[in-house]
Amino acid sequence: MNNHFQRALVAVLVSTGLLISTVAFAHHQEPERENITTLLRAYDAFPKATAFKSVAEDPRTVLLEIVADDSEPEIIRLQALDALSLFPDADVRQVFRKVVAESWDHSQAPRATHNAINGLMFGWGEAALDDVLPLLSHPDLQVRLTVVHAVGKSGGDAGRTALQAQLNDEKDPYVREAIQIHAKSIR
Amino acid sequence: MRTRTLVLVTGLVLALGACSDDSDYSGQVGTNNGANNGNNGANNGGGQENNGANNGNNGNNGVNNGVNNGNNGNNGNNGPANNGVEPVGLPDGSACVGADECEGGTCLPEDDGYAGGYCTHLECATTGECSDNGQCAFLDQDREQSACFARCDDASPCREAYECRQFGEVSFCLPAEPEPETRPDGAPCTTRDQCAGGVCFTESDGFPEGYCTTINCSDRTDCTGEGNACLQAGRPNYCVHLCESAAECREGYICQPVGRGQGYCAPSPTAGNEVPQPGDLPFDIVCGETLAERDAYQGGLDRHTFDFSLPDGTTSFMIVPYSPGGQIYPVTLQGPNGTLNMFDEYDFALANAGFLINVTPILVPQAPQFTDFVTGGDYTMTMASEENLCFYVLPKTEPGDSIDLNIHFVGVRGLDAASAGNHGGFQAALQRFDEIYEQAGINIRNIRYMDADADTTNRFRVLRTQEGAFQLVARSEKPGEERDDVLSINVFFIDQFAIDGGSVLGISAGLPGAAGFHGGRASGLVFAASVLSDPTLLGQVLAHEVGHYVGLFHTTEQGGRGTDPLADTPECSPQQWGDPGRCPDIRNLMFPFAGNDHSTISDAQAGVVHSNPLVK
């Protein structure tokens, strides 16, 4: 066998090997995404982090893909945002921050805004206050209500203090009422 | 004269801006004394000096005036005896029983807080109309009512139960302020005087039987009583009674968590809920003290036992026991063919008690193995409850083939009652719902579309808690007076769920919900327009949640932790849950995860659905 043929044969074998490994990898990914998508379709009880981990090696990566996939139905992408808060890291936080930033372009914020607010506070607690508290000035009443609820629940004493201070500026009776309900602590 | 206000125990407000200023008093008094002296004699009608003296010190006006002034006068000898008619009756401020005893013609009664009665002149315009010892003052902020009150000073003290209270430059004999009671924060109350903290949140404020508190507290050192702390609630802060469980709170209160394992006694969300009374619904409701035999049970609840009858030919029924507030749950149901034990073979009937709290609809049979339990005859229901109960029973004698929906639009973007009939996506979802239930021989018959009011929309178009779903469906109202009207399902279509930690696709307020009961926690189901971009999926969600509402459980719970009580639905074991796509029950309508082809209804499931009175 001359060297030229040997090199060609090696090239074929290598490329075939690569093809086989690529196909195997894709097959590994497809069931994970399918299972993750199944979990995101929970009717009336959102799955725990352990459920996502039981169906995928890296649920966070799959969820990020789903959020970025415009072909997915809105509800699935919203649920994926919720699920990302179960796996907080810098990339996830950046996704939430981007959603929050984009909400200012709309007087009625996109639905994802609420998921991002919840995700930031649920995933990072007090550390996310700087991301979320500015939304207390958002023109959308529902956004401000979500902020009050999320900060009241996960924002600790600092968050509640900030909410109570907001009573100086907030005029809407629903938000004011929400602050008085959710911004409670005991001393 | 400066104006001050005083809240008396009688609720009268003494506004001592009084009837006019001092200078006017002088002139008017002079005039009035002249007039009075028309009754009292020429002496007082005399010179200005006397009138001036009259204004100053209640006296020095002569023997008769001194007599007329009673104890308040400095009875000088300024003039000849009074030639006028003697004033009849006791002067202002005197003790009395009846009006005829009083110079002024009015005796303020004890019931109004005037111990021993209090003579006065009502509707005085000036002090000159009062007894010589009296001064005219307004009783209310609006200055619409006035009366004469006895002046006082060190030399002229007040009688027992009265105190000399100063208002600006004058002092009056007024009922003594009651000693404040020492009820601590969190205790019941009707008025603030009962509370050591000085504030009473009343029933009208949403606090059952009232709630003593201290407002504007900074921390627990500002609060009164043991076990209390300062709730930082914004405007204002107020003191609350701490707790670890509801057992430590009064009836009508729950232990509301505030983090760090702490809680405080707060009004129950079900407290004050309106519940149907006899006559409210087109079927018999039975309520009241004599409804049931009652004895102590457990967990602070009493056992209530009551009877009802079902007609011959009954094939299924729903019984709906409820209370105005407070926890209830079923214990046993005894009939001609045996007894169902809610803590044993019929334990799935307890599912409602945990989240519906004060209403627990029970569907029989909720699984085919209990079909033989149902027959015409006499039944006895035993419930556990804090309070007295009401109940109604809805028997069925035939399966039915239709349901009616009341769809409430709660701030959905681009969809409302007016546009729903022509909205392609929404109608496609309803079409999908019909296709699914056609398997069980059931179709939607009537649909009512309605828009939620502005308050409901603002509060609930984005639902942030599961509890919010129960509060939302409690805003439903019966859509009509006929039996056919009230046996309909309330469906609330909101814009989205935004529940931290993970949202849901829909919530059914009851498993089953309370057929015929509108305006309560078990009065409907909720799903969201965030699914509207996939109408087939939306129809699936609606069908699944209606399935819960009419009595269907998940075929298998997430993780394989539990299954429904039906023998013909597949189950997914815990081991299989690692790949839920391969669960044998994934194609069933009641699998816990949605999918466009998750729509199968088994025969047993169809039987449960047909048992429900909502299927007509």
Image (tube, coloured by chain):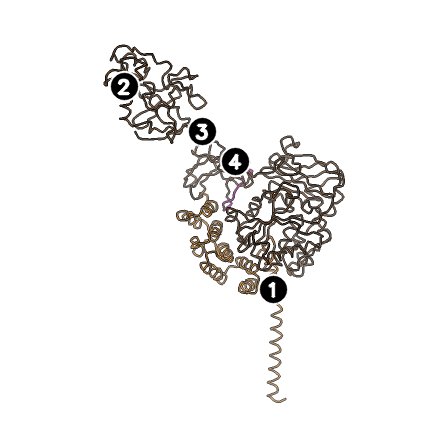
Chain colours: A orange, B brown
| 10 Å crowding of disc 4: few (<14), some (14-19), many (20+) | many
Q: Which mark, residue B54? A: 2
Which residue type does callout 2 highlight?
Asn
Q: B349 or A12: nearer the eye?
A: B349
Q: Are marks 4 and 3 in contact (CB under 8 Å)?
A: no
Question: Please, what secondary structure does the residue beneath circle 2 have?
Answer: helix
Name the residue carrying label 1.
A32
Query: Given the image, on which type of amino acid does mark 1 rest?
Result: Glu
Tell me which numbered mark, 2 or 4, is placed earlier along the sequence: 2
Give the CA separation, mark 4 to mark 1: 53 Å
Distance from disc 2 to disc 1, alpha carbons, whole Å, reads 101 Å
Badge 3 and badge 2 both on one subunit: yes
Q: Residues within 10 Å of mark 3 (few under 14, many from 20)?
A: few
Quick one: label 4 or label 3, which is nearer the N terminus?
3
Q: For mark 2, does the 10 Å Cα neighbourhood hold few (<14), some (14 to 19), or many (20 or more) residues?
A: many
Who is closer to the viewer here, A108 or B216? Answer: A108
Q: What is the CA distance from the residue labelled 4 to the residue labelled 3?
A: 19 Å
Q: Is the Cβ of the residue at disc 4 closer than 8 Å to that at disc 1?
A: no
